Image: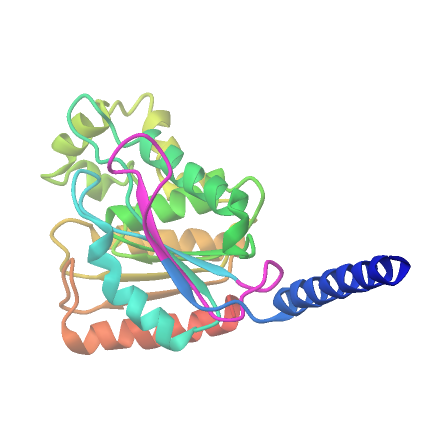
């Protein structure tokens, strides 16, 4: 009987030892690349994001791109940024990528603070979801209205200073710009945001303008604009770059001659090359 008890204890010990070793081996194995699509971060069906997680990621080293689509704050979809997902996966395979949707605005349902709140909710979700195993260093890349939101969040709402770079592709920057105030689309813009411009009280428009809220603590910024853009006056990019220069914020600014709100193939390639180099210098 004594020998039977001894065998039982030996077998039990071996099982526990093997199980422990297996857990330790699994803990040190590199994490596989994976993705989660249409992750909900709120009750609205529009509050979803896609996340692409790289091989070998760690919570200490894996930086995160956040992609923000355009659509005049009232339209667009994260699928519009899939071209950027593919490009970033090829050029920066060690980074995670989050491609976001946010709640779309409409008359009586203004973009702000709703869409900034959505970005904040996404960041909170990323940082609280342990399975992702990603760092809390972010690089924002936005197009048009998405570029406006990317800059506004990065310059004014990133209270933890976790944004390390931001890219604006034809994003609005200054809603008190005289060239914008006289622009044909400005009246409808004010109606969307639930505001009527008052030169004696410009603060509501300043508060939603990256140009006015940016400080010397802003992250490195790269800006791309066209000088024939029918939606965004040239001064939006020129003045934003000048403001960043005055504050001593690292930035690069490209103004494409003859380009509008979307770039032709040659300049789109140039944008990708310059953005890749900028990321390599400031977010790699």
Residue 264 position, x and y percent, is 14, 71
Q: Which residues are magenta?
A: 36-62
The image position of residue 116, as x and y in percent, is 37, 36
| Quadrant of the image occupied by residue 208 | top left
Residue 84 to residue 159: above or below: below
Pick the front one: 128 or 221? 128
> Quick one: 6 or 93, which is closer to the camera?
6
> In the image, is residue 55 part of the stretch drawn in magenta?
yes
User: Is the residue 125 above or below the residue 195 in the image?
Assistant: below
- In-image side of 36 versus 226 (left or right): right
Q: Residue furthest front?
A: 1
The residue positioned 25% from the left and 38% from the top of the image is 46
Residue 163 visible (yes or no): no
Q: Residue at x 16, y 35 (%)?
A: 186
Work out which quarter of the rendered image holds the N terminus and state it.
bottom right
Q: Quadrant of residue 238?
A: bottom left
Residue drawn 21% across the image and 32% down it: 105
* Residue 120 rendering spot, x and y as whole percentages: 44, 38
Q: Position of residue 249 (x, y in %)?
A: 51, 57
Q: Nearer the viewer, residue 55 or 265?
A: 55
- The residue shown at (9%, 39%) is 184
97 horizontally vs 224: left or right: right
| Left or right: 268 as drawn, with respect to 42 | left
From the viewer's perspective, is residue 114 above or below residue 237? above
Please tell me whether residue 101 belongs to the stretch shown in magenta.
no
Q: From where the camera sits, is residue 144 visible?
A: yes
């Amino acid at each position: 009987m004594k020998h039977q008890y001894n065998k039982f204890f030996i077998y039990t010990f071996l099982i526990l030892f093997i199980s422990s070793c297996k857990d330790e081996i699994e803990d040190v194995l590199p994490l596989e690349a994976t993705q989660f699509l249409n992750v909900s971060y709120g009750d609205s069906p529009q509050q979803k994001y896609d996340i692409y997680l790289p091989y070998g990621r760690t919570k200490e080293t894996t930086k995160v791109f956040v992609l923000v689509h355009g659509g005049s704050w009232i339209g667009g979809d994260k699928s519009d940024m899939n071209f950027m997902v593919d490009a970033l996966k090829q050029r920066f395979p060690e980074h995670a990528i989050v491609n976001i949707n946010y709640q779309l605005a409409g008359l009586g349902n203004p973009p702000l603070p709703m869409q900034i709140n959505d970005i904040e909710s996404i960041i909170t979700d990323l940082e609280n979801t342990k399975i992702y195993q990603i760092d809390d260093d972010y690089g924002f890349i936005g197009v048009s209205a998405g570029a406006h939101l990317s800059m506004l969040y990065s310059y004014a709402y990133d209270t933890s200073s976790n944004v390390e770079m931001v890219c604006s592709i034809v994003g609005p920057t200054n809603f008190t710009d005289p060239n914008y105030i006289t622009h044909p689309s400005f009246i409808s813009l004010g109606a969307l945001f639930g505001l009527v411009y008052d030169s004696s009280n410009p603060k509501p428009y300043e508060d939603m303008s990256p140009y006015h809220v940016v400080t010397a603590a802003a992250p490195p910024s790269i800006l791309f604009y066209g000088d024939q853009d029918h939606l965004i006056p040239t001064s939006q990019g020129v003045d934003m770059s000048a403001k960043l220069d005055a504050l001593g914020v690292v930035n690069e600014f490209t103004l494409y001659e003859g380009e509008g709100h979307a770039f032709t193939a040659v300049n789109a390639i140039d944008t990708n090359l310059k953005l890749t180099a900028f990321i390599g210098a400031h977010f790699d």
